[in-house]
Image: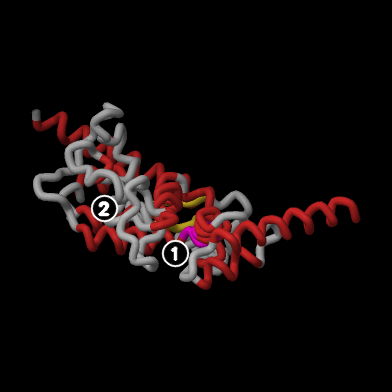
């Protein structure tokens, strides 16, 4: 055990030395503080920033949606499905709409393909170094984590459970171990009924405002009610043809 601890200490000593050599005069203090406090110190500024956002997915979610609101919806854009990878159109309505990932509306190198804002040094969202956009990047580090969170929110179930004080939002009882992450407004309903919502606001349905953790039995009952609703809609639509 002592040998492993010695190797870890030596590895961190080398990582800290490498990080300090690469650090610019200006660097986000919260990011640096967290990096130096990690069991394994990230050896580069970019990895330090990535580690920070991975530890704070809800902050990344809020920031990505705020940056998207600054960009606004591109002129002529509508939420469409495609499946053609070259076009950038999503294959299913479960994928968050992202106009700047589409080939038609892409802003090119130096702009984030999720929020549409400029990407600066180390994938940061603000130009702390007065160096202009990073022409080799098209993602903010925060937007990478937000995109992962939107597409797989169950990966942050433990964090969401803690936010809810470990109480089921449907029944009010304590969350069980098999509790599941759910969208309050189902994504199929967003696609069918709320498709014309302005784009930046659409992202709320994939982000924290539309997420909850509920017990498995409550989730099953909710899904059954939604399936019945969809079948009724299809039956009524078929009867009117």
Asked whether residue 217 is in view, the answer is: no
Residue 185 colored in magenta in the image: no
Please state the horizontal and vertical placement of residue 196, each as a whole percent of the image. 15, 50
Residue occupied by mark 1: 59
Mark positioned earlier in the residue sequence (1 or 2): 1
Disc 1 and disc 2: Cα gap in Å? 18 Å
Front position in the image: 34 or 185: 34
| In-image side of 139 versus 180 (left or right) | left
Mark 2: few, some, or many residues within 10 Å (few <14, many ≥20)?
many
| In-image side of 173 versus 142 (left or right) | right
| In-image side of 209 versus 13 (left or right) | left
Please state the horizontal and vertical placement of residue 88, each as a whole percent of the image. 27, 35
Asked whether residue 110 is in view, the answer is: yes
Q: Is residue 65 above or below residue 144?
A: below
**Residue pictured at 15% horizontal, 50% vertical:** 74
**Residue pictured at 38% horizontal, 68% vertical:** 128
- Dividing the image into 4 quarters, which one contains the C terminus? top left
Mark 1: few, some, or many residues within 10 Å (few <14, many ≥20)?
some
Main SS, magenta residues: helix
Front position in the image: 39 or 181: 39
Residue occupied by mark 2: 116
Q: Please give the range of residues in magenta.
A: 53-57
**Residue pictured at 21% horizontal, 33% vertical:** 235
For numbered disc 2, what is the local secondary structure? loop
For numbered disc 1, what is the local secondary structure? helix
Residue 55 colored in magenta in the image: yes
Q: How many marks?
A: 2
Front position in the image: 189 or 36: 36
Please state the horizontal and vertical placement of residue 122, each as a whole percent of the image. 44, 56
């Amino acid at each position: 055990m002592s040998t492993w601890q010695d190797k870890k200490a030596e590895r961190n000593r080398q990582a800290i030395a490498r990080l300090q050599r690469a650090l610019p005069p200006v660097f986000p203090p919260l990011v640096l503080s967290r990096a130096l406090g990690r069991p394994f110190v990230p050896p580069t500024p970019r990895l330090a920033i990535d580690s920070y956002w991975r530890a704070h997915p809800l902050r990344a979610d809020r920031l990505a949606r705020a940056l998207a609101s600054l960009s606004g919806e591109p002129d002529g854009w509508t939420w469409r499905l495609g499946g053609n990878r070259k076009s950038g159109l999503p294959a299913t309505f479960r994928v968050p709409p992202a106009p700047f990932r589409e080939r038609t509306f892409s802003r090119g190198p130096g702009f984030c393909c999720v929020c549409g804002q400029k990407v600066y040094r180390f994938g940061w969202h603000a130009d702390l170094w007065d160096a202009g956009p990073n022409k080799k990047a098209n993602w903010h580090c925060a937007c990478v984590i937000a995109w992962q969170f939107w597409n797989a929110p169950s990966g942050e179930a433990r964090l969401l459970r803690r936010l809810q004080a470990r109480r089921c939002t449907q029944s009010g009882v304590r969350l069980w171990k098999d509790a599941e992450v759910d969208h309050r407004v189902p994504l199929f309903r967003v696609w069918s009924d709320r498709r014309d919502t302005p784009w930046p606001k659409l992202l709320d349905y994939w982000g924290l405002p539309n997420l909850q953790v509920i017990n498995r039995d409550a989730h099953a009952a909710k899904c059954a009610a939604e399936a019945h609703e969809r079948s009724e809609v299809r039956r009524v639509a078929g009867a009117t043809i």
